[in-house]
Amino acid sequence: MDKPISGMMIYYYIVCKRKLWYFYNQIQMETESENVKIGKVLDETAYEREEKHINIDDVINIDYIKDKGILHEVKKSKKIEEAGIMQVKYYLYYLKQKGVEDIKGKIDYPLLKQRIDIELTDEDEKHIESVLIELKEIVNRPLPPLLEKKRICKKCAYFELCYI
């Protein structure tokens, strides 16, 4: 594996390992996706006063940091909340590996007017380390993982690639 593991890769690992493989191997379908377009508009219009897209090492891209020690990730909906939580925990983990301590995260759902707090535990760190091992194994396979039919597939940017 020659590319660093991004937050989006962690997100895709939770959502769909096949999507992760496509994304890592530069097969990208997001440009035509209506859901992705909606997400981009939300990104451009929500929290306009904040300094956004804080890129660290070209590995993690934090949506914004408002208060000292609290990073924010903006999501459109809670449909895949587990993946968003894991993405933010990975950001916290990555920063901790860089020596940044006492940092927490939040996921903002501006359309729902909700927010959840995220903290990184020792157990989370162990889980992330095992995820990183499996993620590297998946992306280095010569072919994508077998298709797992899920309810979210119908709205996925990769739907046609997987089903047609």
Image (cartoon, rainbow, N blue to C red):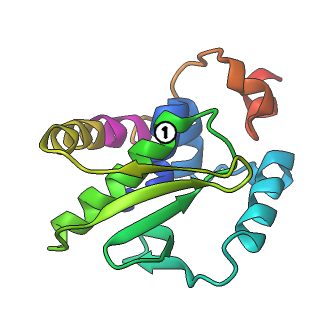
Residue, x 40% and y 35% (percent of image)?
138
Can residue 143 be seen here? The reply is: no
Which type of secondary structure does the marked residue at label 1 adopt? helix
At horizontal 13% and vertical 44% (from top left) the residue drawn is 122
- Judging depth in this view, the residue of 67 and 7 nearest the camera is 67
Specify the principal SS of the magenta part.
helix
Where does residue 115 sit, x and y in percent of width and height?
A: 54, 51
- Depth check, front residue: 99 or 16: 99
Does the segment drawn in magenta span residue 135? yes
Q: Is residue 8 visible?
A: yes
Does the magenta portion include 130? no
Q: Residue furthest front?
A: 113
- Residue 35 in the image: above or below residue 44: above
Q: Residue at x 71, y 69 (%)?
A: 46
Q: Is residue 130 above or below residue 95?
A: above
In the image, the segment drawn in magenta is: 134-139
Callout 1: 10 Å neighbours few (<14), some, many (20+)?
many
Q: In the rendered image, which quarter is residue 78 located in?
A: top right
Q: Is residue 73 left or right of residue 127?
A: right
Where does the C terminus fall, quadrant-wise? top right
The percent position of residue 156, horizontal first and vertical second, equals: 74, 35
- The residue where tag 1 is placed is 83
Tell me the amino acid under the disc marked 1.
Ala
